[in-house]
Amino acid sequence: MPAVLALQFRVLAALVLRETRATFGSSQIGYLWAIITPAASTVLLVIIFTAIGRHAPFGASLALFFATGILTLEFFNRLSRTLMTAFDANRALLSYPPIKETDVLFARAILVAFTYILIMGIFFSGLVALGLAGLPAHPLELMEAIGTTFLLGFGMGATNAVIFSMWESWRQVEKIATRPLFIVSAIFYVPSYLPPQVIDWLKWNPVLHTVEWMRNGYYANYDSRVLDKFYVLSVAVCLIFIGLQGERLTRRRRSGG
Amino acid sequence: MIELKAVSKTYRLKGMKKRIFNRLTFTFPHDRNVAIVGPNGAGKSTLMRLISGAEQPDEGRIIRHGKISWPLAFSGGFNGSMTGLENIRFVARIYGADTDAVIEYVKEFSELGASLATPIKTYSSGMKARLAFGMSMAIDFDCYLIDEITAVGDGVFKRKSKAVFREKLPRARIIMVSHAMAQIREYCDCGLLVSRQGIWYFDNIEDLIAAYQEMMRAEKKHKVRAALDAASY
């Protein structure tokens, strides 16, 4: 088995490097933009909300509160969208016998995960350096939250990829369907403070749970009343199952059979 | 080296379902060069694409051992916006070859010079084929897949390619699709006859060629008769 694992590792490493090159171009500026864009949108939000005189919904720092929300959502969204086109973009690579269709999916997911872990690292370090935030209170829980967001995003992305390869309009449908996520994922409010009737609806949204999980990890006493770890992990596992099983079932149709 | 286990493949052509392979089980001998011959449209190239993994069987499994090449001189796996060098590095990595050694070899062999540093989309098809061929020679494969030997480049380059390829032969196996019996004789020891009626394995290359030529004659006769029948109405 070690030979098989070595092969799998080699193929994934080669694909990740290739995807990096294809996504960000040959210049270092390309990769820099990937980090600047989500950071800039968070900064912009902070400026707007500060200008209209809002206080942080929780804790002392508005920037930290938004960052925990929006970076989690962006991580999920980026995974879900990047994986969607993975099959179509790399059909020709299948002519190389060591490469399997799922390898491309895994490689893209790994690249996005590295990018966003780097973004979060830089952004949170920046806030700490500027005195806008303290160190995370429960680092382990923060890591669990990032891991769960990865699983959820990967499941959604794999499922998207299968649907997209069968039905191209899915890209537009998905774009419209996920737009409200910005509002319903607790980016700029604390869901525990909302009326129970509203919570009952919002808690169906798995992304909201990942955001809550992040805040539970970062703040010492966030104590989310909404967070249901079992629920969000179940959704993630189900989506991964649907995505990978769907890939297996529809593989023939894609390879022109 | 390569095992097919109960492999089935059906094509849908103009609404008609056409079953090309029906539970085909075959193990390619690991110490012999195998030819794949047969009339057009019987499934030779499909078999090749199944072996390389470019297509998936409807049922059954294909198990590959060792380093198997992509179809020789096939350049469709290149990424057009990446440079020649970047494409070489990618392929060297997936096969676990020494990247620098492969680059040196391909530079020397392909004679592409400074073009290697420009994106593949600026290459002519001849340049791409030279790059692909050079790459498949730079990596030591256990088995080369060849879907019709197509000569690349001018006379000198052709001779060079052939010489390098022959050097590989003692250490590598070949699976080759071809219509040219001279090539089949030159490179292969045994083979598969793939036809609409079925698939046969021949342990002796001359028996394979004889059976193939017999089949083509019969088919031609059949075609002539069909044409005459049609004409007489």
Image: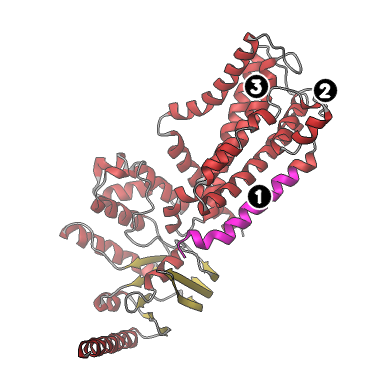
- Amino acid type at circle 1 is Ile
Name the mark on residue A138: none
* Callout 1 and callout 3 share a chain: yes
Badge 1 marks a residue whose secondary structure is helix
| For residue B28, above or below residue A229 | below
| For residue B114, above or below residue B208 | above
Badge 3 marks a residue whose secondary structure is helix
Q: Residue furthest left?
A: B155
* Magenta residue span: A233-257
- Amino acid type at circle 3 is Phe
Query: How many tags in the picture?
Result: 3
Q: Chain of mark 1?
A: A
| Residue A1 in sight here | yes
- Amino acid type at circle 2 is Asn
Q: Which residue is mark 3?
A: A124
What residue is at 25 percent from the left and 52 percent from the top? B125
Viewer-proximal residue among A213 and B101: A213
Q: Chain of mark 3?
A: A
| Residue A71 position within the rendered picture, expressed as x and y whole percent measured from the top left | 63, 28
